[in-house]
Every structure is written in structure tokens, then in C-alpha cells.
Image (spheres, grey):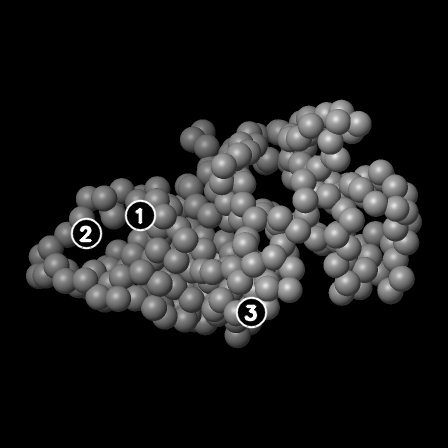
């Protein structure tokens, strides 16, 4: 078996296939699709990304890199179809390696095992952009998003997180982002001890030199959400009363997570 570098862009709506002696192992991926961009292998979803979290290329306006798949790599065996589902003409970039199998050689067992499991456990994300033009007083809290884990699924959020409050395009750094699971917050509970929530600029949306170049992450404090449980994201005003000066105020958040389908 020989190994070659893989770095290609796939176009939404085109059906691709591997040759009888070739397999692909995808270790990184990105897209230019602002909506959901889904990689399907043999018709099965194995990866869901969006350009805010995983752009095609790292630039000074979005310093996020290709999403690193790690143990959740996507394997495409020989003689297998695959395609990208998303917005017409948009692309997904895939990086990894090509396996060139010798005559009669089988896909190595580790890759075969990942292929069998990849439609049951893979990277996805949740996101919300809320238009909320009402004045928010000092200490006021805005509910941005409630995600209730569907029956038959389990989610783990231990990857990229982005959050922002905008007055039109002007970033309002007086807001902290706050996470709740089953209405229990993931930070200090007594507001007189410390400012509530987490510094929003620590979770830039997206990371860039003019705001914060380091992406925000929940890697060190992962959150597991089981069927029927709810993860809520709010923004709390740590400054004076905020009234939009532009056309709209926007509250937005995105979390990259692992979606796992539970055995029935």
C-alpha cells in the first residue's frame, strides 16, 4: 500500500466516487458555504460544517483553520460514492491522504472500523443569530439560543465556540456570554462576587487580528448534552444600558460539537 497527499475542493451537487484500488482518509475539512455543508459517504452524513467555523482557507478576516477531525476522520473506501450537500456552487475542501491499495489488498482494519462508525458519530455544529432590537438595561440578560438534544442523539461540545453581540456591524464588548445546562449556569452563581458570564471576546466570531486572533474553545471544559436535556446560551450586559444606534442589534453564537446517534 502506498500513501499520497490529499488536498482537494469538492463542489456541492457533484457525485464523486473512489476507484477500485483507492481509498480516501479525510483528516481536515473546510467550506465557503455560510449554510450547512454536509459530506455524505454512500449516502450517509459523516460531517457537517459551515464557513464561519471552518473556512476553505485561513485569512486575516477569519483566522479559524480547517476543522481537525482527529479520531472522527472520514474514510471513503474503494468503489464508494460521496458528495457534498449544501448551497449550489459552494465547496468543501478536504485534506488528508489517499491510500493506493495493491491488487487484492483490503482496507486496513482500523479504517474499516471508522468507516462503519462514521455515520453514527461525527462533527457537526449548532448556531443561532438573533435579531433583538429591544433596549437591554445594565445587568440585563438576553436569551439567544436554546438547544434541546433530540431523542436518539447525544452531543458533546468540546471544540470551537464563537459568540458576539453587534450593533449593525459594530461589536459590543460590554456583553458576556453565559451557558446553562438544564437552567444551571456554567460559571459563578453570585453576581456580587464576580461579573457573570464569560468574556465574549475570548470567543471571537470569528477570530481576527482586530478583535482576538485566538479561537475560543470548550476543550478544557466539555459539555455533554443527553436526549431531552437543554443547553441555553445567553448574553448578559455587564455595562450601562444598551440601545442600538444602527438598524438592528444581533446576538449570535456557534458551537462545534460531536453528534452521536445512540443505539436503539
**Element type at mark 2:** loop
The CA distance from mark 2 to mark 1 is: 10 Å
- Badge 3 crowding class, 10 Å Cα cut-off, few under 14, some 14 to 19, many 20 or more, is few
**Element type at mark 1:** helix
User: Is 17 placed left or right of 146 in the picture?
Assistant: left
Q: From the image, state whether disc 3 or disc 2 is nearer to you.
A: 3
User: Is 145 placed left or right of 238 in the picture?
Assistant: left
Q: Quadrant of the C terminus?
A: top left
Q: Position of residue 256 (x, y in %)?
A: 54, 48
Residue 153 in sight = no
Pick whichever of labels 3 and 2 is earlier in the sequence: 3
Callout 3 touching callout 2 (CB < 8 Å): no
The CA distance from mark 3 to mark 2 is: 40 Å
Residue at horizontal 11%, vertical 55%? Answer: 105
Pick whichever of labels 2 and 1 is earlier in the sequence: 2
* Residue with the mark numbered 2: 107
Residue 40 in which image quadrant: bottom left
> Residue lying farthest bottom?
89
In this rendering, is residue 93 above or below 187?
Answer: below
Q: Position of residue 190 (x, y in %)?
A: 76, 25
Residue at horizontal 88%, vertical 46%? Answer: 240
Residue at horizontal 24%, vertical 60%? Answer: 23
Residue 60 - label: 3
Callout 2 touching callout 1 (CB < 8 Å): yes
Q: Position of residue 188 (x, y in %)?
A: 69, 28
**Viewer-nearest residue: 85 or 221:** 221
* Residue with the mark numbered 1: 115
User: Is 29 placed left or right of 203 in the picture?
Assistant: left
**Viewer-nearest residue: 136 or 201:** 201
- Badge 2 crowding class, 10 Å Cα cut-off, few under 14, some 14 to 19, many 20 or more, is many
Amino acid at each position: 500500500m502506498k500513501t499520497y497527499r490529499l488536498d482537494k475542493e469538492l463542489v456541492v451537487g457533484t457525485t464523486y466516487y473512489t476507484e477500485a484500488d483507492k481509498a480516501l482518509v479525510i483528516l481536515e475539512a473546510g467550506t465557503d458555504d455560510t449554510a450547512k455543508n454536509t459530506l455524505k459517504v454512500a449516502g450517509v452524513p459523516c460531517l457537517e460544517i459551515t464557513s464561519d467555523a471552518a473556512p476553505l482557507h485561513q485569512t486575516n478576516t477569519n483566522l479559524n483553520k480547517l476543522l481537525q477531525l482527529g479520531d472522527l476522520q472520514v474514510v471513503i473506501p474503494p468503489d464508494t460514492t460521496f458528495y457534498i450537500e449544501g448551497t449550489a456552487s459552494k465547496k468543501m475542501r478536504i485534506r488528508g491522504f489517499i491510500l493506493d491499495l495493491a491488487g487484492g489488498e483490503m482496507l486496513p482494519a482500523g479504517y474499516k472500523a471508522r468507516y462503519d462508525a462514521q455515520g453514527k458519530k461525527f462533527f457537526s455544529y449548532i448556531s443561532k443569530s438573533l435579531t433583538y432590537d429591544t433596549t437591554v438595561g445594565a445587568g440585563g440578560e438576553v436569551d439567544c439560543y436554546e438547544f434541546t438534544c433530540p431523542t436518539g442523539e447525544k452531543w458533546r461540545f468540546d471544540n470551537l465556540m464563537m459568540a458576539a453581540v453587534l450593533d449593525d456591524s459594530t461589536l459590543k464588548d460590554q456583553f458576556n456570554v453565559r451557558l446553562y445546562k438544564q437552567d444551571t449556569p456554567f460559571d459563578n452563581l453570585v453576581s456580587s462576587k464576580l461579573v457573570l458570564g464569560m468574556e465574549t471576546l475570548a470567543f471571537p466570531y470569528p477570530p481576527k487580528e482586530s478583535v482576538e486572533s485566538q479561537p475560543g474553545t470548550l476543550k478544557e471544559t466539555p459539555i455533554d448534552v443527553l436526549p431531552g436535556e437543554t443547553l441555553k446560551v445567553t448574553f448578559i450586559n455587564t455595562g450601562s444600558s444598551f440601545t442600538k444606534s444602527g438598524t438592528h442589534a444581533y446576538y449570535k453564537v456557534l458551537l462545534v460539537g460531536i453528534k452521536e446517534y445512540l443505539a436503539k
